[in-house]
Amino acid sequence: MVIMAANPTSAEWAYNLARERYADLGVDTELALKTLAEVSISLHCWQGDDVGGFENPDGELGGGLAATGNYPGKARNADELRMDLDQAYSLIPGTHRLNLHSIYAETGGQRVERDRLEVEHFSRWLDWAKEKKHGLDFNPTCFSHPKANGGFTLASADPGIRRFWIDHCIACRRIGAAFGEQLSTALGTAPTITNIWIPDGYKDTPADRKTHRLLLADSLDQILEEKLNPAYHKDAVEGKLFGIGAESYTAGSHEFYLGYAISRKTLLTLDSGHFHPTETIADKISSVLIYLDEILLHVSRGVRWDSDHVVILNDDLLAIMQEIVRGGYLKRVHIGLDYFDASINRLAAWVIGTRNAQKALLQALLEPSVQLQRLEAAGDYTGRLFLLEEAKSLPYGAVWEHFCTQQGVPTGANVLEEIRKYEAGVLGKRL
Ligand code: RNT
Ligand code: ZN
C-alpha cells in the first residue's frame, strides 16, 4: 500500500469548504470541535492484555467472558501495558481517561487477596496517570477467581463467598475514591467512577429467581454504606442479559439495576452488548436520564451475542452519540469503552474504537439539529427524512482531519503506519 502524507494546504482547504457547507445549514464547526476536544473517553485497560490482569499469569478469563484470538504482542506486565497505552493515546486526539480493573494491581510479586487491596497497590498507575494527565476509573473484578467458580459472587447464597466479594467491592470503592481525590487535586479531572459488574447467574432454568436478587441488593447496600465524597468518587452498577454459561438467568439484570440505581442514587452503566440483539442502548438514554442524574456507557459491539467486538462507525454508535448530543447530556453521560479483541493488533483495537467513538460524536455535534427539529415540530416528516439522509454525506471527514491536526495526532493511513511501526519495534518482539 502506498501511503501518502496529507498535504496540509489541501487539508486546510477542505476544512474551509466544509466549514462553509455546515455554516449554510446553521452548524458551527468551530464550536463542534471545541466541544469534542472537551470530551474525555475512558479507555478500558483490558483491551491491552485480553482481560488477563497481572494477579495470576496463568489465570483463565472467567465470568462468562471470552477474549478470542491469539494475535501476538499482548502486554505481559503493567509497564508494557502503560507503554502500549501511551502509544494509543498518542494516536487519539484529545485527553482521555483510563478505566482500570482491580486485577491490574501491582503487588510486587506478593499475593494480595482482592479483599485486601489498597490504593498503594496502584501507586504506579497513579503516578503514571498524574504524569500523563489521565483521569482514572475503576472496577472491582468479580470474576477470574476461585471464589467466583461457583457462578455467584455478590448474589451468592454462600455467606463466606458473598462476604469476600462484598469486602472486595468495599476495598475497590476506597481505591476509586483515593484515585479521584488525588487526580482531581493534581489535574482537576472529573471524579473516579467505580463500576460494579458481576457475572452471577445460571446456565439453566432457575427454580428461584428472587433469592439471588434479594441477596444482591443487600450486598450492594452493604458496599455502598460508607459515604464517599461525590466530588471525588461516584458509583455505577452494570446490568446484563446473559453470559456464557449463564444463559438462562442473570441476577443483575437491567431492570434490577435500573431500580437499584434510581432508588440508591448511583449511576447506571449501559453496555451496548448487554441487551437483546435488536435492542439498542441509544433509545434508553433519554428515558433513564429522567430518573437518574448521570449514567456511564460501556460502548461495545455485540456480533450475534455480547462478543465485545471493536467499536466501528455504524448506525448504533452514531445513534448513541446523537442521543447524547441532542439531549444536551454531555455532562451527564460518561463515555467508556468495553471490548476485547485478541485476534488483531491490540493497539489498533484501542485506537480504531476510540477514534470511531469520537468520529460518531463529531458527526452528532455537526448535525443540523435546529432545522431537523423545526421540520419535526412542523410535522414535515418528509423534510426530516430528507435532511437526515442528506446529513450523512456532509463533509464531516474534513472536519475530523482538521481536528486531528489541531490536536497533533496523525490522520488517515498515517495512523496505521504508526501502529505498524510500534508492532515492528515493540509488540512483535514479545513472545
Ligand atoms: C461484562 C461487562 C464488564 C466487563 C469488564 C471487563 O460483560 O461488560 O463491564 O466487560 O468489567
Ligand atoms: Zn461492560
Image (cartoon, rainbow, N blue to C red):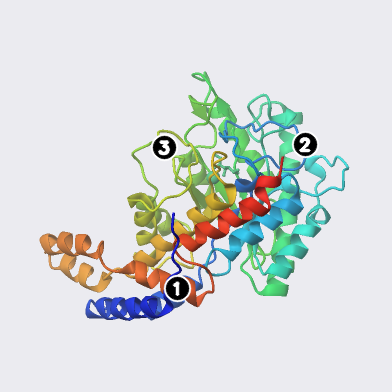
For image coordinates 39% across by 36% down, the residue present is 276
The percent coordinates of residue 227 (x first, y second) are 70, 58
For image coordinates 22% across by 61% down, the residue present is 388
What amino acid type is highlighted by mark number 2? Asn
Which mark lies nearer to you, 1 or 2? Answer: 1
For image coordinates 22% across by 68% down, the residue present is 373
- Name the N-terminal-most of marks 3 and 2: 2
- State the mark number for residue 177: none
Residue named by callout 1: 403
The percent coordinates of residue 413 (x first, y second) are 46, 60
Residue named by callout 2: 56
Neighbour tally class for label 1: few under 14, some 14-19, many 20 plus, Cα within 10 Å: many
Q: Please, what secondary structure does the residue beneath circle 3 have?
A: loop
From where the camera sits, is residue 294 visible? Answer: no
Is 18 placed left or right of 67 in the picture?
A: left
- Name the N-terminal-most of marks 1 and 2: 2
As measured in the structure, the alpha-carbon distance from the residue carrying label 3 to the one carrying label 2 is: 30 Å
Q: Dividing the picture into quarters, in which one does residue 231 lie?
A: bottom right
For image coordinates 13% across by 64% down, the residue present is 383
